[in-house]
């Protein structure tokens, strides 16, 4: 992967009006703030740390540019030239331990020559377009997200998945466990209905006997994203919306029969057994974090 990053750096530099030495000088101004973004001390020398910022940030910006415009890829692009490669790269980009401070990526993006910015949308929009195009079905970009409040890519994708109107879920573990399964709710007369395709995943509603839940796609890729969002909420967030969402789903989907109902009525994409297994996989993590949030409240 390091070779790919260096090739992308070589392609990125001519897109700016700067030399490599100039980039080093700019990155040094980011070093102190960037180090504070990590929960643990980064045991790299100043030169090593600055090199990491330059190589990783330029790689991400170049990756996004080539995603936005095919013409930037060239005939021999070794990442976009292979479907498995771009999937693997996107997977690595979304691992919480691989996150780069967003302000560094934003700063590197801002170094592009003005001619590029004339035809480029905002960075947040480019990131959204990239993952929607290559990796997964994600909600439309309906929220107003301040760049200054974004920690990294996982944080941004988490924000995109949140509904426009937010309210912190209350209740207790006992109340959550008392929620009936999907089959039980249907047998009680509740109508199950999918939401519009563009609705974000957490925008769940119940009114007049109708439970409305947005469609989501459950597979290895989205499971990885949700797992990293949950890890992020565990470590850095007080508003654990996604953890509550996964806990909510795990209460409804208690058996393969419940999973089949979700696939049939809500349009969830995934095989019955796989869907149930993927929900179960994140269940223990969500329960653990829910318990900790109650203890600390």
Image (cartoon, rainbow, N blue to C red):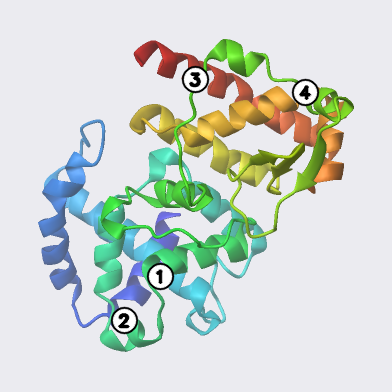
Quick one: which residue is furthest to the front in this view?
208
Asked where in the image residue 187 lies, by quadrant, the reply is: top right
**Could you tell which of marks 3 and 2 lies nearer the N-terminus?**
2
- Marks 1 and 2 in Cβ contact (< 8 Å): yes
- Marks 1 and 3 in Cβ contact (< 8 Å): no
The mark closer to the camera, 3 or 2, is 3
Left or right of 165, for residue 88: right
Residue 158 makes an appearance in the image: yes
Residue annotated with mark 1: 62
CA gap, disc 4 to disc 1?
46 Å
Q: Mark 4 Cα within 10 Å, few/some/many (few <14, many 20+)?
A: many
Disc 4 secondary structure class:
loop
CA gap, disc 4 to disc 3?
19 Å
Instruction: State the residue at coordinates (68%, 48%).
Output: 214
Front one among 141 and 62: 141
CA gap, disc 1 to disc 3?
38 Å
Disc 1 secondary structure class:
helix
Q: Is residue 6 above or below residue 240?
A: below
Left or right of 48, for residue 130: right
Instruction: State the residue at coordinates (22%, 37%).
Output: 42
The numbered dot on residue 8 is none
Residue annotated with mark 4: 181
**Could you tell which of marks 4 and 1 lies nearer the N-terminus?**
1
**Could you tell which of marks 2 and 4 lies nearer the N-terminus?**
2
Residue annotated with mark 2: 15
**Could you tell which of marks 1 and 2 lies nearer the N-terminus?**
2
Residue annotated with mark 3: 290
Disc 2 secondary structure class:
helix
Where residue 93 sits in the image (x, y, percent)? 46, 51
């Amino acid at each position: 992967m390091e070779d790919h990053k260096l090739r992308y750096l070589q392609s990125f530099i001519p897109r700016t009006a700067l030399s490599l030495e100039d980039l080093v000088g700019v990155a040094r101004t980011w070093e102190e703030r960037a180090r504070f973004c990590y929960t643990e001390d980064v045991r790299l020398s100043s030169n090593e740390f600055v090199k990491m910022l330059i190589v990783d940030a330029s790689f991400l910006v170049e990756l996004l540019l080539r995603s936005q415009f095919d013409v930037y890829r060239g005939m021999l692009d070794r990442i976009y030239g292979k479907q498995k490669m771009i999937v693997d790269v996107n997977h690595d980009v979304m691992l919480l331990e691989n996150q780069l401070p967003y302000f560094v990526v934003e700063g590197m993006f801002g170094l592009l020559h003005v001619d590029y910015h004339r035809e480029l949308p905002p960075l947040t929009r480019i990131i959204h377009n990239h993952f929607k195009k290559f990796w997964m079905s994600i909600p439309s970009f309906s929220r107003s997200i301040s760049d200054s409040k974004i920690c990294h890519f996982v944080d941004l994708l988490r924000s995109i998945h949140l509904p426009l109107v937010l309210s912190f879920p209350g209740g207790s573990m006992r109340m959550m466990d008392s929620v009936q399964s999907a089959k039980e709710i249907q047998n009680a007369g509740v109508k199950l209905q999918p939401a519009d395709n563009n609705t974000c995943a957490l925008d769940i509603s119940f009114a007049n006997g109708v439970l409305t839940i947005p469609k989501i796609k459950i597979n290895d890729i989205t499971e990885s994203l949700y797992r990293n969002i949950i890890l992020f909420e565990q470590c850095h967030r007080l508003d654990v919306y996604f953890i509550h969402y996964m806990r909510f789903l795990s209460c409804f989907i208690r058996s393969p029969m419940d999973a089949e109902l979700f696939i049939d009525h809500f349009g969830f994409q995934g095989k019955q057994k796989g869907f149930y297994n993927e929900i179960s996989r994140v269940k223990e993590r969500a329960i653990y974090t829910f318990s900790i949030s109650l203890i600390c409240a």
